[in-house]
Amino acid sequence: MSIMKPTTRFFRFNSLELAVSPFQRIYGQLRFLRKQPKPFLVKLLNNEVSKLGRQGDVVSVTRGYYRNTLFPKKQAIAVDALKSMKAHLLQGSEFSTKTKE
């Protein structure tokens, strides 16, 4: 019984012959399936969060931070166009109350 070795195939690439083993072909296909970094989530803060912002601020946070910290404590909500406008109005009213004092 003979031990079978993986066969290599030759490909021409820019007039060069390249030997590619089956393992290299599989790895080349799998490297495109790796997880890509996910974008930040945009959330509206319900109350002040240390090192993040004040009430009414629209902040970008990672998915894990929102899921594990902000959402269970109800410190942030999702932002759509209407909530974004409301946040803008809240910030304007806070600014006007500070100037009156």
Image (spheres, rainbow, N blue to C red):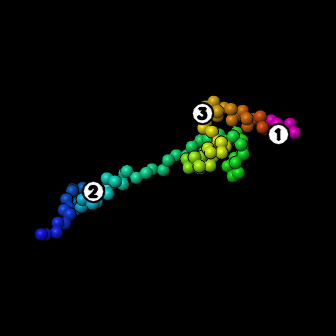
The residue that appears at 36% across and 54% down in the rendered structure is 31
Question: Badge 2 local density, few (<14 within 10 Å), some, or many (20+)?
Answer: few
Check the image and name the residue furthest to the front: 72
Q: Which residue is mark 2?
A: 25
> What main secondary structure does the magenta stretch of the protein show?
helix
Identify the element where label 2 is drawn. Answer: helix
Q: Position of residue 82 (x, y in %)?
A: 63, 30
The label shown at residue 98 is: 1
The label shown at residue 80 is: 3
Confirm or deny contact between disc 2 and disc 3 (CB under 8 A). no
Give the quarter of the figure containing the C terminus.
top right
The residue that appears at 19% across and 62% down in the rendered structure is 7
> Is 5 left, or right, of 91 in this rendering?
left
Q: How many marks?
A: 3
Give the quarter of the figure containing the N terminus.
bottom left
Q: Earlier in the sequence, mark 2 or mark 3?
A: 2
Query: What amino acid type should be assigned to the residue bearing mark 1?
Result: Lys
Q: CA distance from mark 1 to mark 2?
A: 65 Å
Which residues are drawn in magenta? 96-101
The residue that appears at 31% across and 55% down in the rendered structure is 28
Q: Position of residue 80 (x, y in %)?
A: 59, 33
Q: CA distance from mark 1 to mark 3?
A: 27 Å
